[in-house]
Image (spheres, coloured by chain):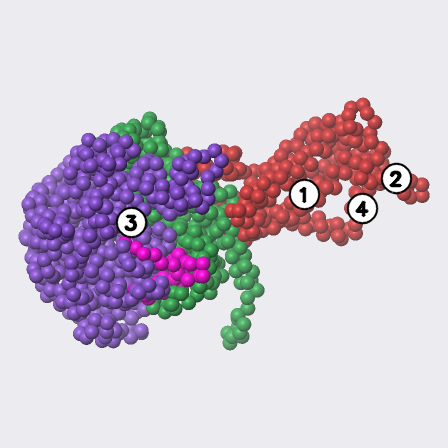
């Protein structure tokens, strides 16, 4: 497998400018002769499809939802980073670049990240022009907040719905192009395979989820913006439909899959209530600004009501372990600490699978603190004691800050978080790994591009808060519109590299289509007893147990064995009801689970080989054993300062691991420390 | 977290093709902490085990923001709890032994595809006809050049919270889409960036809405009560106002130039 | 015609008709004065140039027709927008639609249709004075047996006795009850319509909606109660051909306290 990152020569800050100048262009009159397939309509997909439409290309855009507006980018809450430095607090392109590289634990590619920081300003301009109602100051200028422990205020936000507003902005641009006929939108279509002709990606096979028709679609280039694979864990904060199928089937057709083991676990999610749980809900990280995280010191206290646990019996473990960052310790660190407490048998909440998986996030101290301040300012009302007034005013102050989150918590759990501490537990949230791409966001298959969460390029081993939205839009609005035409300029419009008109090139398309039809038929004809959901649920438990927050060599080896067994069960005992020629959610899920079953194994393999701890990948064998940093992740830059790229070698064959060495020209490697 | 379990009778609309009917199912052992859609998952697993075909329903994010879930529960779109979507409705809001009737959204522009799944592309078409600000990627001016008063930005945000689920149409006795259209029109028409094509947008979106076959607004406010995101009738009023202005301007507008081929 | 234009037409014609109803009520309430008062008022109205009178009548008729025609169009479209009804529909809003259950869907159209029937009857009754209504116009007109005399001395003249006609017209309980029912529906129609028309032209918001709703209901109560008061008072014997009696058996008030007709 040839892995040329194609990083332009020259100083880091000039690379993108140079690349843009060096890229070949397509004459406006010729653009209408080219067609581009965009799979996915989230931030990356919608923005790319809209931008190509505006440039004059014919675009076909696919999404599995009933409307492009529903892609899961919509669920992002916090905000979007940009190096605008509107706050005059020391931000710059270079600082955003450095923070992202450091946050990624020095496992991302320098040039890509620098470009991301460079174009981040344009994203905000673009979104505001589209009518995205970002929060504003009274003077009418844009407001910012500090997010995820960042030392500058660079995060732009639209209440707690930034992802929704950005996606609706991109969706409106996309809709405009659909209305103009530049983009043909295929709702409720799921990409099931990639078609490669003469070594170049020239089309896809997709299933119409309403009629069940499996059809081929042809284009001069294919772009995958199909999101992350967090649902391999069954329970995650991803939407139910999120899947790895498009990326994984591209991998099976020869695309390299990079760093699949990098998963981000978010510390503040609402714990699972039991086996009926189908997905997890994230609570904004901002809650940790005022909440204190604790678990009971004694196991026997775990079943007690939190109010019955004495102050001296509570373990505020983040404050104890990380005195300077305390409750604001980074995501991966807080997540692991919660897991440790629960693994020691000190978890709280309902027992799920024999364990209590939850810790408290307590606002009592904050209510008292704010209440006392407010009492001095506002005084009490008649007939009220001081304590009552403090409680009332303190709760009001908390409601003002986090009211909507508290309501959401109460709606889901039925508990009143003003009166009893919230229960939280980490959950899978984002996946940094993805299809390998070069500087142009092109995979190792010419003509196949990959953007957004689906690629691996910008976040290294860990993603900073408010950077996912930035990356999706950067790729779609400002990177792909330059790099894809550069590829197209090397291709004859509507022709295969071999010189056959695309719409006449039946062979490759028919073969792949037949493969897909046969695959679905195979799924439908097993006629066993286990439903796709049950197998998915089992897979999720294996992944979470052995390839979740903390991983060990033994665990990963065991997991690979268990997954292989489960895969056998899947292919011998699966039950898919209904028919293939119509709306059939069971068939859809079966296909996705089939891919997760192979992909999960790949993740474990990647985690197994990476004998170090970095960012979202924590190997218990690789932690600091002594000193103040005891228990922290131990990176091994000598052996693993590279991108791991997996090549598919066939069913039941072991995949081959390739390496793209990372080259840092600007940044010096350092150890992350939050003590 | 209560740990109690419920047994329920479900009357679910089953439809393939153009006609459908209710079927009755019993489910047991439903945790009060489960969401309504988790209860539907359990129902479906049960139907599959019994050799039947599961109930098709739309759902995706399951955290109340994507707008895909769409069930009329006991005659109320998104169920009895105000301000939440079906996916955020939890079973503790129902009583043990209760019979729950589940129907799809019902409106001519939202034809049923299967069971509880309806086709809402009419909403997409409305947006495609004008629910945007025409700005090319890369041609935007700096974001802080045009100051937007905070209250204007906040109002636009109030309107922009719409998730496009269609509960407004489903709840309206006339299956009117005025709340949806009003919200989008108000968001864009309120912002300085959206003023340039305000009239054009308003006229085009209303026309597409009418052509799709939605009913018209009777100003009762049932949509507002059903909206999981708290969109208010204010935005319908703004749509009415903006449309009136646009229509009058359009009526008196002259092309301002004589052209060779007449008009 | 765009749906919104239809709503504007409903609002504007509605506004005209509400205005007319209020004016009409103010005129009619003179029934509670001495008979001369309303007869003088009727004389004034009839002395308008026919062109003006018929212009106003034509305009009102046009408003009624447009209101009805567009209303029918809307009702049809609204019905077509949901070909398959919910089996189970619950309203979660305290709107008229919810209070009247399944009738809610027909709330405005139904009250409108009955009102139309009422208007037709009312015109036949007191304007056309069709024979079947029991009113013989000639009896009340100049030279008729019930004709009224206005003024005294040289200015004395016989005029149409509206007062007597109304009292006679409402002396049939069935007729009066129909009027009362019609006016209850007028209340229902106005209670929603008067506030709704502000919304239809975009002049309402959530802050003012409760206020306008209250105002609309208040206006509807006043209008309906005012109109109901007349047939009710006739049935109760409070209004007689001689004028208003405060109680059974007492003498009718000789003159209206607002304006003494015979003072000149």
Give the residue pinned by disc 1: C21
Quick check: do tags 1 and 4 share a chain? yes
Distance between mark 1 and mark 3 Cα atoms: 61 Å
Give the residue pinned by disc 3: A285
Q: Which residues are magenta?
A: A119-148
Give the answer, above or below, for where C180 lies relative to A268: above
Residue at 45 percent across and 34 percent down: it is A384
Residue at 21 percent across and 43 percent down: it is A317
Q: Chain of mark 3?
A: A
The colour applied to the residues of chain A in this rendering is purple
Q: Earlier in the sequence, mark 2 or mark 1?
A: 1
Q: Earlier in the sequence, mark 2 or mark 4?
A: 4
Distance between mark 4 and mark 3 Cα atoms: 78 Å
For mark 2, give the secondary structure.
helix
Q: Position of residue B85 (x, y in %)?
A: 36, 42
Residue at 68 percent across and 51 percent down: it is C59
């Amino acid at each position: 497998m040839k892995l040329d990152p194609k990083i332009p020569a020259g100083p880091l800050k000039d690379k993108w400018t140079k690349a843009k100048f060096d890229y070949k262009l397509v004459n406006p009159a010729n653009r209408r002769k080219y067609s581009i397939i965009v799979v996915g309509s989230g931030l990356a997909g919608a923005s790319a499809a809209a931008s190509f439409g505006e440039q004059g290309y014919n675009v076909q855009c696919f999404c599995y939802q009933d409307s492009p507006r529903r892609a899961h980018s919509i669920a992002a809450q916090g905000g979007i980073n940009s190096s605008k430095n509107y706050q005059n607090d020391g931000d710059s392109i270079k600082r955003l670049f450095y923070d992202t590289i450091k946050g990624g634990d020095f496992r991302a590619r320098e040039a890509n990240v620098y470009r991301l920081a460079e174009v981040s300003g344009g994203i905000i301009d673009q979104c505001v022009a589209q009518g995205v109602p970002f929060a504003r100051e009274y003077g009418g200028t844009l407001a910012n907040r500090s997010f995820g422990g960042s030392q500058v205020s660079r995060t732009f936000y639209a209440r707690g719905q930034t992802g929704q507003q950005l996606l609706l902005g991109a969706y409106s641009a996309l809709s405009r192009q659909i209305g103009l006929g530049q983009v043909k939108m295929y709702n409720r279509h799921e990409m099931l395979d990639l078609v490669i002709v003469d070594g170049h990606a020239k089309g896809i096979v997709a299933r119409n989820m309403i009629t069940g028709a499996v059809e081929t679609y042809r284009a001069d280039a294919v772009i995958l913006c199909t999101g992350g694979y967090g649902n391999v864990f069954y329970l995650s904060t991803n939407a139910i439909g999120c899947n790895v199928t498009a990326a994984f089937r591209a991998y099976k057709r020869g695309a390299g899959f990079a760093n699949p083991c990098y998963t981000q676990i978010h510390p503040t999610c609402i714990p699972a209530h039991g086996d009926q749980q189908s997905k997890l809900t994230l609570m904004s990280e901002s809650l940790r600004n005022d909440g204190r995280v604790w678990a009971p010191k004694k196991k026997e206290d775990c079943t007690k009501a939190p109010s019955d646990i004495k102050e001296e019996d509570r373990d505020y473990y983040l404050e104890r372990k990380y005195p300077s960052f305390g409750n604001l310790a980074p995501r991966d660190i807080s997540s692991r600490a919660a897991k440790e407490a629960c693994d020691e048998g000190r978890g709280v909440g309902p027992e799920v699978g024999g364990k209590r998986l939850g810790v408290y996030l307590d606002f009592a101290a904050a209510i008292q603190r704010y209440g006392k301040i407010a009492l001095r300012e506002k005084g009490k009302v008649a007939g009220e004691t001081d304590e009552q007034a403090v409680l009332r005013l303190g709760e009001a102050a908390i409601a003002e800050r986090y009211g909507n989150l508290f309501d959401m918590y109460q709606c889901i759990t039925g508990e009143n978080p003003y009166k009893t501490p919230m229960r939280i537990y980490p959950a899978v949230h984002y996946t940094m790994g993805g299809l390998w791409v070069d500087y142009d966001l092109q995979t190792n298959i010419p003509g196949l591009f990959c953007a957004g969460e689906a690629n691996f390029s910008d976040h290294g081993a860990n993603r900073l808060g408010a950077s996912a939205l930035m990356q999706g839009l950067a790729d779609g609005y400002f990177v792909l519109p330059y790099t894809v035409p550069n590829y197209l300029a090397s291709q004859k419009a509507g022709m295969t590299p071999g010189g056959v008109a695309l719409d006449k090139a039946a062979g490759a398309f028919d073969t792949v289509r037949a493969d897909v039809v046969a695959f679905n038929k195979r799924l439908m004809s097993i006629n066993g007893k286990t439903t796709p959901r049950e197998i998915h649920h089992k897979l999720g438990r294996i992944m979470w147990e052995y390839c979740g927050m903390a991983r060990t060599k033994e665990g990963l080896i065991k997991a690979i064995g268990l997954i292989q067994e489960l895969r056998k069960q899947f292919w011998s005992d699966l039950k898919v009801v209904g028919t293939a020629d119509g709306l059939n959610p069971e068939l859809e899920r079966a296909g996705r689970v089939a891919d997760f079953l192979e992909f999960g194994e790949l993740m474990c393999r990647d985690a197994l080989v990476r004998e170090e701890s970095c960012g979202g990948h924590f190997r218990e064998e690789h932690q600091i054993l002594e000193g103040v940093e005891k228990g922290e992740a131990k990176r091994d830059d000598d052996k693993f300062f590279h991108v791991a790229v997996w090549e598919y070698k066939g069913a039941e064959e072991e995949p081959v691991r390739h390496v793209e060495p990372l080259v840092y020209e600007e940044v010096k490697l350092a150890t992350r420390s939050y003590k | 977290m209560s740990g109690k379990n419920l047994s329920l009778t479900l009357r679910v609309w089953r439809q393939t093709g153009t006609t459908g009917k209710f079927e009755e199912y019993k489910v047991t052992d439903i945790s009060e902490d489960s969401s309504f859609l988790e209860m539907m998952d359990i129902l479906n697993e049960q139907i599959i085990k019994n050799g039947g075909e599961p109930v098709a329903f739309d759902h995706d994010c399951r955290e109340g923001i994507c707008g895909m879930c769409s069930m009329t529960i006991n005659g109320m779109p998104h169920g009895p709890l105000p301000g939440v979507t079906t996916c955020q409705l939890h079973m503790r809001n129902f009583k043990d032994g209760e019979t729950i009737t589940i129907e799809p959204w019902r409106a001519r522009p939202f034809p049923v595809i299967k069971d509880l799944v309806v086709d809402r592309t009419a909403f997409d078409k409305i947006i495609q006809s004008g629910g945007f600000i025409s700005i090319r990627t890369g041609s935007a001016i700096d974001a802080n050049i045009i100051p937007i008063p905070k209250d204007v930005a906040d109002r636009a945000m109030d309107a922009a919270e719409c998730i496009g689920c269609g509960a407004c149409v489903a709840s309206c006795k006339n299956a009117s889409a005025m709340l949806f259209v009003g919200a989008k029109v108000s968001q864009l028409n309120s912002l300085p960036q959206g003023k340039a094509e305000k009239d054009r947008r308003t006229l085009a979106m209303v026309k597409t809405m009418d052509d799709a076959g939605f009913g018209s607004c009777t100003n009762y406010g049932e949509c507002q009560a059903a909206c999981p995101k708290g969109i208010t009738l204010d935005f319908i009023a703004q749509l009415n106002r903006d449309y009136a202005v646009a229509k009058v301007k359009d009526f008196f507008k002259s092309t301002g130039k004589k052209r060779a081929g007449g008009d | 015609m765009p749906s919104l234009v239809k709503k504007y037409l409903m609002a504007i014609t509605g506004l005209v008709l509400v205005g007319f109803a209020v004016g009409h009520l103010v005129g009619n309430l003179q029934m509670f004065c001495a008979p001369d008062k309303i007869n003088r008022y009727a004389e004034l109205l009839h002395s308008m140039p026919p062109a003006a009178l018929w212009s106003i009548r034509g305009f009102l008729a046009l408003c009624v027709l447009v209101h009805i025609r567009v209303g029918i169009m809307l009702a049809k479209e609204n019905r077509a927008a949901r070909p398959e009804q919910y089996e189970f529909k619950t309203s979660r809003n305290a709107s008229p639609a919810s209070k009247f259950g399944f009738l809610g869907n027909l709330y405005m159209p139904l009250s409108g249709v009955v009102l139309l029937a009422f208007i037709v009857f009312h015109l036949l009754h007191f304007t056309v004075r069709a024979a079947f209504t029991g009113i013989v116009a000639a009896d009340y007109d100049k030279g008729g047996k019930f004709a009224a005399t206005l003024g005294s001395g040289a200015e004395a003249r016989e005029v149409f006795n509206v007062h007597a006609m109304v009292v006679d017209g409402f002396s049939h309980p069935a007729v009066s009850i129909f009027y009362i029912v019609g006016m209850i529906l007028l209340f229902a129609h106005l209670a929603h319509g008067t506030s709704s028309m502000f919304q239809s032209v975009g002049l309402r918001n959530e802050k003012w909606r409760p206020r306008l709703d209250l105002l609309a209901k208040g206006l509807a109560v006043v209008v309906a109660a005012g109109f109901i008061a007349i047939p009710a008072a006739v049935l109760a014997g409070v209004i007689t051909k001689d004028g208003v009696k405060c109680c059974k058996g007492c003498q009718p008030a000789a003159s209206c306290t607002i304006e003494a007709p015979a003072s000149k």
